[in-house]
Amino acid sequence: MTDLTKLTLAEARDKLRAGDVTSVELTETFLKAIDDADALNAFVHKTPEIALERAKAADARIAQGDAPDMCGLPIGIKDLFCTKGVASQAASGILEGFTPEYESTVSQKLVDTGAVMLGKLNMDEFAMGSSNETSVYGNAINPWRRGNDDAALTPGGSSGGSASAVAADLCLAATGTDTGGSIRQPAAFTGITGIKPTYGRCSRWGVVAFASSLDQAGPMTKDVRDAAIMLEAMCGHDEKDSTSVDLPVPNFEAMLTGDIRGKKIGIPKEYRMDGMPAEIEKLWEDGTEMLKAAGAEIVDISLPHTKYALPAYYVIAPAEASSNLARYDGVRYGHRATLAAGDGITEMYEKTRAEGFGHEVQRRVMVGTYVLSAGFYDAYYNRARRVRTLIKQDFENVFAQGIDAILTPATPSAAFGLGEMTDADPIQMYLNDVFTVTVNLAGLPGVSVPTGLDSQGLPLGLQLIGRPWEEGDLLNTAYALEQAAGFVAKPGKWW
Amino acid sequence: MSIDESTAAKVAKLARIKVEEDALPALAQEFNAVLGFIEQLNEVDVDGVEPMVSVTPMRLKRRVDVVTDGDQQDKILSNAPDAREGFFAVPKVVE
């Protein structure tokens, strides 16, 4: 008997179509796996009734023979996506009790294809974090451990619950969102695949906003083929998001030939950071060799403004967050503080936001407020936006030279222990996104692919960055890398 | 640029987040750590560089200026911490 939880999306799809298994069977198997995995704290709102109802409908649709790829496939949804009638809190106390009256465009598209939502997944509060430690639900736990050491590790963040759930086989795949690396870093920390598409590919409507010019949704899956299948189901033009692009969505899966002969792969020298662990360096070199062996041409390139991406990000993202999060005022939804006698509306705002927002969110909102305040707007915010232009130009220049994709490490380290960064200053945590944040600032597609293990047995990933709107070609390069790396390790089950 | 406690208090006020007096020194210190990091941007020559407005060179889609939804007062109020008689209720704003 096959262990149904170990299937990929593609395998499960084919089994459903062949009649080897029903969506209800698959769904029941995953619901049990989820109930057995509370120790991972990945699923924070379980929706078994909705899941079984959708599974039954999917089985009927499959029986009729016209089911889309995702039909009947059980997945998890990050808590950042508004889901009608189901708690959607962005892992924040300020949205306690919020149940949307509407469904986000991306999750609605998944519903429309017949995908089965198993529940909502843990994350950093408002997607602000790199370790899932800022969540109001508590930490999500990485199913991977260092050898025989049972210390709990972070699954990364902000899509930590999504990463943990997919790596631990609690769902076939999950949605994530990525503002500075929040899909790719957790994917790398848990040995799974995650793609952030080009800015504008996925509608942001109904996704709780963090930094609107950077936020993009994307799939987190067990392999590259699954990423292609699920990405196609998630993207497409949406009238309700004016930044969503009106371009046809290709059949990404059909583009996975594994043939990358003649492709030019750029290796940016600025990503060779001081103090980079030897294991990461080796991983990157091995990945370069694999692409070369597959027939790609390796080209040394320069992205001179790389160093300034993180500081620019830590102006732009908090600035946009301070504006977006102004809506949490205790009036229309979510938490409202209990007021003392004589408190007016200002006290209501101040107490509500102090009680509802966690520490990191408060800090970022206030940093954003500061960089946008009179007298500093030009010095910080406008300067950061100018630097962002330069960062984007760096990429445009190398693409103009004929580079098809850029290979970099996904993260500067393997997963670290929960609590290990507690005493570090915030900048240490921000450095997690050093290789991924440039991609958001330039609006490009980026994919993280697991390609190796470190000496403690933890997964490591490489990132491929593609040209805008060319996710299909990027996924094909990722597919070639995946084939060459042959990463098959799974975490041992301890939960 | 170094942030002192009174600036931290002012920023907290602008952000409408209540910060207790005794938490201000630590907050100011955190601001300084983050702003110190951001200061690196001053090394970049940005003369003549346009601030980015949109990462994708596209004209935002327009639509006809007509009402496309509405008439859903119950749904809009359904998550309000305090709704009365079809309105959001808040503490007294004007005397």
Image (spheres, grey):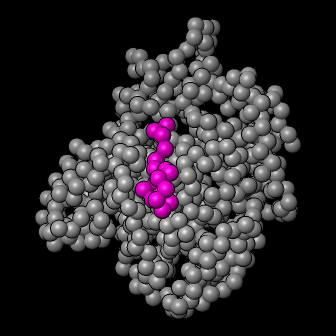
Q: Position of residue A170 (x, y in %)?
A: 33, 55
Would you say the magenta stretch is mainly helix, strand or loop?
loop
**Which quarter of the figure has residue A4?**
bottom left
The verdict on residue B90 being magenta is no
The residues colored magenta run A136-152
Q: Where is residue A354 in the image (x, y as percent from the top left)?
A: 60, 27
**Which quarter of the figure has residue A360?**
top right
Tell me: A285 left or right of A235: right
The verdict on residue A142 being magenta is yes
The answer to which of B39 and B22 lies nearer the viewer is B22
The answer to which of A26 and A347 lies nearer the viewer is A26
Tell me: A75 left or right of A159: left
The answer to which of A79 and B79 lies nearer the viewer is A79
Q: Which quarter shows the N terminus of chain A?
A: bottom left
Tell me: B57 left or right of A252: right
The answer to which of A47 and A468 lies nearer the viewer is A47
Question: What is the number of callouts on the image?
Answer: 0
Q: Where is residue A31 in the image (x, y as percent from the top left)?
A: 26, 50
Instruction: Reply above or below: A149 against B78.
Output: below
Name which residue lies at 85% across and 56% down.
B42
Tell me: B3 left or right of B63: right
Instruction: Reply above or below: A321 against A415.
Output: above
Instruction: Reply above or below: A406 against A358.
Output: below
Observer able to see residue B54: no
